[in-house]
Image (cartoon, rainbow, N blue to C red):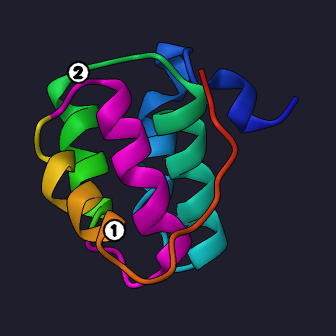
Amino acid sequence: MKLLSFGDDPRALGTLLALMQDADDNVRDWATFGLGVLGDMDSQEIRDALCQRMSDPNRDVREESPVGSGKRKDQRALPVLISELNQSEISAYPEIS
């Protein structure tokens, strides 16, 4: 079973948070997506980790993090989302409910 299947499993939280800081862009991206977008767990630790990823050097990670933050109604996502909406090119991620 893939680790992303555990986005709502508290036992996977520490691992996903650690992977969100991995040196590999793809690992950070998938961990951010798994915890932030696929998962519904919410805590200050998760919100802070997602906020840190908003300034990630990798664009995919930067785009996943405000989605996860917005899902948790974290106001820190607003400036990032507004800035992205003001860009000439906007990424087209599918809607996630």
* First-in-chain label (2 vs 1): 2
Q: Which residues are magenta?
A: 55-74
Q: In terms of secondary structure, what is the magenta stretch mainly?
A: helix
**Mark count:** 2
Up/down of 39 relative to 29, above or below: above
Residue at left offset 26%, top offset 73%: 55
Instruction: Tell me if 93 is positioned left or right of 54 in this view.
Output: right
> Which x, y percent locates residue 72?
29, 24
Alpha-carbon neighbours of circle 1 within 10 Å: few (<14), some, or many (≥20)? some
Q: Position of residue 32 (x, y in %)?
A: 50, 50
Are the residues flagged by discs 2 and 1 in contact, CB closer than 8 Å? no
Q: Nearer the viewer, residue 3 or 30?
A: 30
Which quarter of the figure is the C terminus placed in? top right
Q: Residue drawn at (47%, 17%), measured in percent from left and top? A: 40
What amino acid does circle 2 point to?
A: Ser
Instruction: Choose top left, top right, bottom left or bottom right for residue 53.
Output: bottom left
Answer whether residue 53 is magenta in the image.
Answer: no
Look at mark 1 in the image and give the residue it sits on: 84
Image coordinates of residue 61 in percent, x first then y, are 48, 65
In front of the other: 91 or 41: 91
Please report the residue visible at 45 percent of the width from the left and 29 percent of the height from the top: 13
- Identify the residue position indicated by label 2 in the image: 43
Which residue in the rendered view is the most extreme toward the right? 1
